[in-house]
Image (cartoon, grey):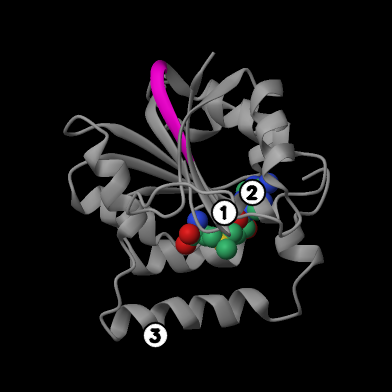
Amino acid sequence: MTQPTRWVTDTKDGHSHWYIDRFRRMAADGEDLAGEARLVDAMLPRAARVLDAGCGTGRVAAELHARGHVVVGVDADPELIDAARADHPGPAWVVGDLSELELADLTPEQGPAELFDAAVLAGNVMVFVAPGTEAEVLRRVGRCVVPDGFVVVGFHVNRHLALDDFDQAVGEAALRVEHRFATWDLKAWHDDADFAVTVLRHR
Ligand SMILES: C[S@@+](CC[C@H](N)C(=O)[O-])C[C@H]1O[C@@H](n2cnc3c(N)ncnc32)[C@H](O)[C@@H]1O
């Protein structure tokens, strides 16, 4: 990895461990952790191929797998990928940096390289990428998606990454904004919203 992510530089020691425990507790308590996956699922044909980019402990990928999609989760944090592997057999899990992502990294050893129908960056992934890598991350993820596929990105605006800067990165990545909402259950976007869910397509 050329540059550490903000997930490493801007969090305290033990953060990954705390995060894994937190999501395991929420799952055990029956909390709804699948809102993002429900939206992505609704936008896809059945048995689609989905890339969960910055998958963390794998909650989004796991739900998409349960809904019949073929899912690969990739994250730079090996501790989170270990937790995803332990908790959610089914999707393929890969340790990797999105700013250096190649389709070949996501392809089974014997299999052909196959593009994804969609990619999802949920839970503030764009806020946690290394500073200055936003456009490269979007470009690399976009290159893993079929020409008529989509990339959907959700993050809190104005936490490291202003929406205008995100939109500029989208353009630099040869993508375009198709839709923007304020929540994963599609509440309308408004300028005071503190969260943005953006659907991107290839330009
Ligand atoms: C708040 S977590 C969200 C995890 C997951 N998407 C979810 O919603 O449950 C943000 C994740 O982004 C990952 N991340 C940030 N920059 C990354 C990069 N350049 N490559 C891969 N993963 C990255 C972090 O390692 C972390 O797991």
**Image mark for residue 126:** 2
User: Is the residue marked by circle 2 packed among few (<14), some (14-19), or many (20+) residues within 10 Å?
Assistant: many
Q: Nearer the viewer, mark 3 or mark 2?
A: 2
**Image mark for residue 155:** 1
- Assign a secondary structure to mark 1: strand
Question: Residue 149: within the magenta?
Answer: yes
**Image mark for residue 25:** 3
User: Is the residue marked by circle 1 packed among few (<14), some (14-19), or many (20+) residues within 10 Å?
Assistant: many
Residue 15 or residue 35, whichever sits in front: 35
In primary-sequence order, the first of circles 2 and 1 is 2
Q: Disc 1 to disc 3, how far (Cα)?
A: 23 Å
Q: Disc 3 to disc 2, how far (Cα)?
A: 25 Å
Cβ of mark 2 under 8 Å from ligand 1: the answer is no
Residue 90 visible in this rendered orientation of the protein: no
Q: Disc 2 to disc 1, how far (Cα)?
A: 7 Å
Q: Start and end of the magenta stretch?
A: 147-152
Q: Nearer the viewer, mark 1 or mark 3?
A: 1
Quadrant of the rendered image containing residue 165: top right
Say if 105 sits above or below 60 in the image: above
- Horizontal side of 118 relative to 136 (left or right) equals left
Residue 19 position within the rendered picture, expressed as x and y whole percent measured from the top left:
55, 76
Q: Are marks 2 and 1 in contact (CB under 8 Å)?
A: yes
* Ligand 1 location (quadrant): bottom right
Q: Are marks 1 and 3 in contact (CB under 8 Å)?
A: no
Q: Amino acid at mark 1?
A: Phe
